Amino acid sequence: MKALTEREQDRIIEMAWEDRTPFEAIHHQFGLPEKEVIQLMRKTLKSSSFKLWRKRVNSGVSQKHLKKRNEDIDRFKCSMQRQITGNKISKR
């Protein structure tokens, strides 16, 4: 697993909890594939929290996998968001 700062780990965990942030967006921004995100979550979260997260990711509610998303959504970020640099989000 890639060495991550505490700040990067916190941001990855935050993104992983968000239903509409796909694993591909995490991979694009941090270079971590889904398998390593799952390992990070397992290592970092309490067992019960990890189980709840996995259950949610694998449910129909979550859109963590691009194949489960509506085909009309073809972006990783909000259309109002200009750019992401170093985990800082610039908005209009």
Image: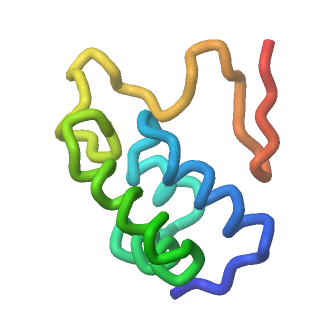
Q: Residue at x 40, y 53 (%)?
A: 23
Residue drawn 51% across the image and 41% down it:
18
Residue 51 drawn above or below residue 19: below
Of the 4 image quadrants, the one containing the C terminus is: top right
Front-most of residues 57 and 9: 57
Residue 37: image location, x then y, percent: 45, 69
Q: How is the image coloured?
A: rainbow
Residue 3 falls in image quadrant = bottom right
User: Vertically, is 64 above or below 72?
Assistant: below
- Left or right placement of residue 56 versus residue 9 in this view: left
| Up-down relation of residue 28 to residue 36 (above or below) | above
Instruction: Find residue 85 and report its horizontal and vertical position in percent.
Output: 77, 45
How many marks the image carries: the answer is 0
Residue 31, x across and y down, in percent: 52, 67
Q: Is residue 56 left or right of residue 29?
A: left
For this rendering, which residue is in front, 58 or 22? 58
Q: Quadrant of residue 2?
A: bottom right
Q: Residue at x 50, y 71 (%)?
A: 41
Percent x, y of residue 46: 54, 75
Q: Within the image, what quadrant is residue 82 found in?
A: top right
Residue shown at 28% from the left, 55% from the top: 55
**Above or below, 42 relative to 23:** below
